[in-house]
Image (spheres, rainbow, N blue to C red):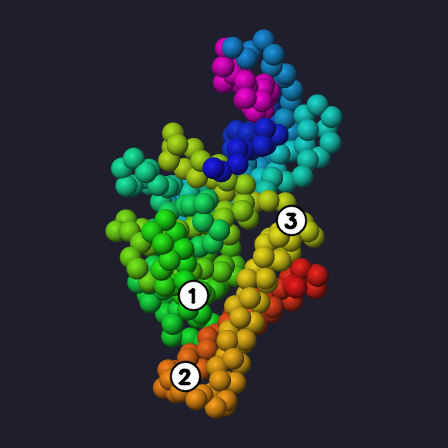
Amino acid sequence: MFPAPRSSLICLVLALATPAVAGDYYKWVDASGSIHFSDSLEGVPPQYRSQIQAGAMDPAPAAPAATPSDGASADDASPVPTGGDAATGAPTPPALPRYEVKYHEYEGRARRILVQARFNDRITAPMALDTGSPDTVISLALAQRLGLFDGDEGKLFVTTGGIGGAAPAIRIVLDKVAIGGAVNNFVPATVIVSPISGEFDGLIGMGFVSSYQVNIDPTRSVIVFQELPASDDAPGGRSEQWWRNTFKDFALYKNGWRRYRDERRRESRAPSGGLYDPVRLKYEQAFAEAQYREAEKLYDKLKRYAIEHYVPMAWRQ
């Protein structure tokens, strides 16, 4: 499930309806603990009028309203100034950007949340949000449309498991994934060779979702991505656990294929005595060498990305 919105988040009603001249405002707190403002008494629900706090607003320019985005249209809303705390006058930090994205539901009772995601600033495709998936998963057809097999960025053959058992897959890294204005760079992903669905081209997993505070509004069919505060403990917007786990996985790929390659080399030089099929051994050695090179490319790409974001060396083990 997605985390619930923080009760301390201030409703954007004031920011979206601030007049250009000074005037009165009315403040109240609803039953869920959310703070609301109105510039007229008629705008306050009757059940909350007994506890309203009145005050005067300073002149301020109107802030642009954030509008829901559907598909590749990005809501690049900037932080909305709140004008300070009405009671103390102390300035408040600017609100972090939030992005509203329309979603659609398919597959009958499954009611999957489908959004339009844009990959590498090239292709937009329908994707299902899946918090049970640790990484992004895309179809082979989408990978081919993106030209992921044309370059030399690292493509490692792996197997992936699920309810239906193990299946062949390809491990890659996507340079960029965007859902509306919510963006992740350097996204490890798995390409599934077998078809995924006739309704969507893959899954957006926790590797993307965990970079935001996420809330779903089923009444408007909108999913809201709220940016998290910048932190030295999350270089590149990723947690220490994400960096450690990703380096561990990529190192396992590289070291495992290197060991297998070296074993095949030793066997090819040793007297076989009929124990090994020389043709099969040659094929396995060539395949292991190719896999090791691809795993090394993925690891080197991760290492460069970590250097760019000053990730501590202890997290890269």
Asked whether residue 102 is in view, the answer is: yes
Helix, strand or loop for disc 3? loop
Q: Which residue is mark 1?
A: 158
Q: Amino acid at mark 2?
A: Tyr
Residue mark closest to the camera, 3 vs 2: 2
Q: Is residue 29 magenta?
A: yes
Q: Amino acid at mark 3?
A: Ala
What's drawn in magenta, residue-wise? 25-46
**Residue 230, numbered circle:** 3
Please tell me which of labels 3 and 2 falls first in the chain.
3
Labels 3 & 2 near each other (Cβ < 8 A): no
Q: Is residue 137 magenta?
A: no
Q: Residue 256: x and y, percent?
A: 53, 70
Q: CA distance from mark 3 to mark 1?
A: 34 Å
At 30% from the left edge and 59% from the top edge, which residue is drawn? Answer: 194
Please tell me which of labels 1 and 2 falls first in the chain.
1
